[in-house]
Amino acid sequence: MADENAEIAQGLRRRDPDLLDRLIEQYQHRLLRYLVHLTGRRELAEDLFQETWVRVLERGRQYDGRRDFTGWLFAIARNLFIDQQRRGRAPSEDSAELDTAAAAGQPSALELAMQHEQSAQILAGMKRLSAEYREALSLRFQEGMSLEEIAGVTGAPLGTVKSRIYRGLSALEPWLKGAGL
Amino acid sequence: MNGDVHERARTLIACGEETPWLAEHLESCAACREFAGSTERTARALRALPITAGWSLVSATQMRVRQRARELQLRQERLGAIWICCAAVTLIAGFTAAALWSGLAWIGERISIAAPVWQMSFVVFSLLPTVVTAILLLARGTHLADNKEV
């Protein structure tokens, strides 16, 4: 992992377009998923997805390879979202729309319908959470980040991260029950 | 047992921290066991949420990044050229100033004029190109501002 980070740091210093192409493909789903949960809007998340990679190109020389690239990447995405909010273009809750796409594999029609129903319930619950809780849950359970890594991305103390995860889960509970979980 | 104990246990469960104390607590607390099961199912459900980036988004991002990379490369090359020009101009200005100073001193000595006079001439000669350029640029700027609407 350390070698991979060092290699990425070298490539970013050179502004190697091939490396960036590879990274965009490698992190496409993870970064978009994080942004969708952070912003609550697919459209805005896609804009920020592009902005994030342009920022990675521009600020790539600041990445020294000593910390995990994923955390650095997500922190850039997060800062862009905060900038966006500061400029007064925060997404409205009403227009929140978390799109879903068919999962991989060949589930039956019934399974597909149930999965869709379950996903819709969970996404509805996620939409109701505040951005901080959504972010904490997404990083913890979808990205599988450790608490320390989440603290690194969000810039929040470890205790706050723990509290956000716990409170987020508690707030999500009614929707999980609704989804039959 | 009070609420704090359950909250502590649930925070540990939510954060995926396994401790002997938590294991012991879970053996005796059905509600927290249920919370642990629910958390596990939630984690699985969240991981299974099908949010994926489309090919068009990835491809558009790659194109945009490549275009920006070209712009930055061009900007860097221009910046390099500007630095070289600045260095050359500084060098030439240094030599010219030294030559002008010596020349004016020599003329001053030949025609026997006071040192402050030729030194003042040196200042005027040195500043003249800058003053003329500034006036021309100001005039051009005023001209452009006046004709902006056209």
Image (tube, grey):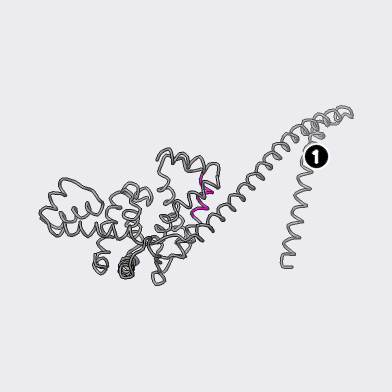
Question: Residue visible at 65% across and 44% down?
Answer: B77
| Residue, disc 1 | B125
Callout 1 amino acid: Phe
| Element type where label 1 sits in the image | helix
Query: With respect to residue A94, does B33 lie above or below?
Result: above
Q: Is residue A128 visible?
A: no
Where, by quadrant of the figure, is residue A101 drawn? bottom left
Which quadrant holds residue B112?
A: top right
Which of A39 and B65 lies nearest the eye of the viewer?
B65
Q: Residue at x 72, y 36 (%)?
A: B88
Q: Position of residue B140 (x, y in %)?
A: 76, 56
Is residue A154 visible in the rendered image? The answer is: yes
Q: Residue furthest right?
A: B111
Q: Position of residue B114 (x, y in %)?
A: 83, 31
Count of labels in the image? 1
* Residue nearer the viewer, B49 or A170: B49
Query: Crowding at label 1, few (<14), some or many (≥20) Cα neighbours within 10 Å?
Result: few
Residue B55: x and y, percent? Answer: 49, 59
Residue A142 in which image quadrant: bottom left
* Left or right side of B2 for A126: right
Q: Main secondary structure of the magenta part?
A: helix
User: Is residue A55 rendered magenta in the image?
Assistant: yes
- Which stretch is magenta? A52-60
The residue under the point 46% across, 64% down is A44
Q: Position of residue B92 (x, y in %)?
A: 75, 35
Q: Is residue B123 left or right of residue A93?
A: right
Q: Nearer the viewer, residue A79 or A20?
A: A20
Q: Chain of mark 1?
A: B
Horizontally, residue A155 falls left or right of residue A19, namely left
